[in-house]
Image (tube, rainbow, N blue to C red):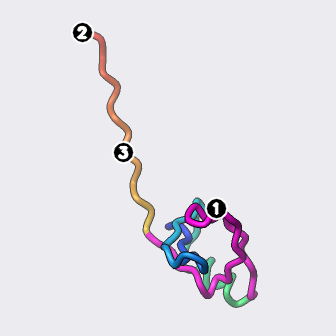
Amino acid sequence: MGVVCYRCPDSGEEVTTAIETGDDTLAKMRALDLTIWVWCPHCMTGHQIKPADATVAPQKPTTIAPTLAAS
């Protein structure tokens, strides 16, 4: 499982979305020729991207700090 990434067509910057999926699902989306609507933090606008223009990047694990017990 990972998150969908794409390159902003205006700025060329890499964008990591909050869309969680796997390579198998992205492949199915490519076969159906679907369009994904996403917000771009680089150019502050929405983009329509094709799954063929996207990749799945590994999700970075979230580290939760241990609770400090009162002494």
Check the image and report above or below for 11 versus 19. Answer: below
Residue at 58% across, 61% down: 41
Residue closer to the observer: 6 or 60 = 6
Circle 3 residue: 63
Circle 1 residue: 44
Q: Amino acid at mark 3?
A: Thr
Query: Crowding near pointer 3: few (<14 within 10 Å), some, many (20+)?
Result: few
Quadrant of residue 70 in the image? top left
Which element is circle 1 on? loop
Whether residue 71 sits left or right of residue 37 in the image: it is left
Residue at 32% across, 31% down: 66
- In this view, the residue farthest toward the top is 71
Indicate which disc, 2 or 1, sits on the residue closer to the N terminus: 1
Spatial CA distance of label 2 from label 1 is: 48 Å
Indicate which disc, 3 or 2, sits on the residue closer to the N terminus: 3
Check the image and report above or below for 49 versus 67. Answer: below
Residue closer to the observer: 49 or 40 = 40
Residue at 60% across, 66% down: 43
Circle 2 residue: 71
Q: Which contiguous range is marked in magenta?
A: 32-57
Which element is circle 3 on? loop
Q: Amino acid at mark 1?
A: Met
Spatial CA distance of label 3 from label 2 is: 24 Å
Spatial CA distance of label 1 from label 3 is: 29 Å
Q: Nearer the viewer, mark 1 or mark 3?
A: 1
Report how many numbered discs are placed on residues in the image. Answer: 3
Query: Crowding near pointer 1: few (<14 within 10 Å), some, many (20+)?
Result: few
Indicate which disc, 1 or 3, sits on the residue closer to the N terminus: 1
**Residue 48 in magenta stretch:** yes
